[in-house]
Image (spheres, rainbow, N blue to C red):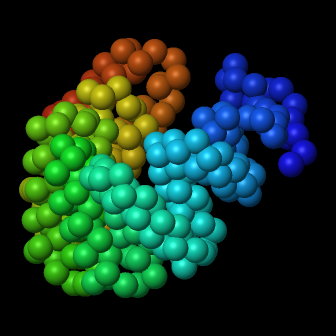
Amino acid sequence: MKPARPAAGGRGDRARLRLVGDAKASAAALLEQARDAEQWLRSDLARDLYERALHRASESSDVVIVHAALLASARLANTAGEPAVALDILEAALASATAHASDADCARAASLRSVVLWGTGDIPGAEREGARAREWARRAGDNREAADALRTLGGLALARGAVGEGIALHEACVAELRVLGHLRDLSATLAAVAELYDDAHRWDASDAAFEEAIAVASGAGDPALALDAELRRAELLARRGDAARAQVARDYEAYASALAHVDAAAGREIRRTHVIEKYERPDHFGGKCG
């Protein structure tokens, strides 16, 4: 493979992707280059590099890199619209993980199989893989992967029309993420649950879940995630016909976007004041919201 050496520049201080294509590169170096290629949206190059990393790792029996390369290759194949190829690769990943008695690797492979099967419309198959992923993750002590499997199973339940079951599985995922303290995952899942509550006309529960999602994202230092939850809430409020509160939410999002790059602490305080004025001072808003 010819060297790929894009010009310097790009995101921040980081130089653009620089792939040497060295025939003597280690499996670890090839894996790192493949990940860089993905970051720079060179999925074609990334797939080639993951395959080379896989072969190099197989030669040295590096099972960690073998599994990482297999999962990444399957994920990219599925993204490229080749689910059959992805499933074949994942069969190999499961076989390798089983041979090395790695419950954690089995869990990750089964989790991705669940996603791929879901995309093909095979909901029963996806649920079977999701359940296997959760069981393997729990055996391995990988509680985050186990919680992810719950969220996937919740989405699959919704896909087959079991709304109550889907909400319950998402709630169970939220409970586990709270214990684990994975704030970004918790915030994203809370926002999803809030939307489910809204669909079920559980307005108070939806509002409370959105409030928690925004608070958790802010506490995690992720303003983009908080803004996403706020905008999703605004869209649902508008759909409910609550135009006044929807506009408040949109104003919040606009304020935060404009201030985020200036001073994070000052931005938080101004956003807080702005929302207090609109929610708690009806005279300022021109009428009580809600």
The residue shown at (63%, 68%) is: 80
Q: Is residue 58 above or below residue 128?
A: above
Q: Is residue 239 visible?
A: yes
Residue 206, given in percent of the width and then of the height, sits at: 16, 57
- Along the line of sight, which residue is nearer the eye, 93 or 41? 93
Residue 29, above or below 111? above
Choose between 30 and 5: the one closer to the eye.
Answer: 30
- 27 up-or-down from 120: above or below: above
Residue found at x 86% / y 48%: 1
- Measured as percent of width and height from the top left, residue 129 is found at 29, 71
Q: Is residue 45 above or below residue 6?
A: below
Q: Residue at x 25, y 36 (%)?
A: 182
In the rendered structure, the answer to whether residue 26 lies left or right of residue 88 reads right
**Residue 29 picture location, percent across and down:** 66, 33
- The residue shown at (58%, 42%) is 60
Q: Nearer the viewer, residue 243 or 211?
A: 211
Instruction: Please identify the quarter of the rendering in which residue 124 is found.
Output: bottom left
Quarter of the rendering containing residue 161: bottom left
How many badges with numbers are in the image? Answer: 0
Q: Can residue 155 be seen?
A: no
Query: Residue 95: percent from the left, percent from the top?
Result: 41, 64
Q: Nearer the viewer, residue 137 or 62?
A: 62
Does 111 sit left or right of 35 as displayed?
left
Q: Is residue 233 left or right of residue 23?
A: left
Instruction: Please identify the quarter of the rendering in which residue 218 is found.
Output: top left
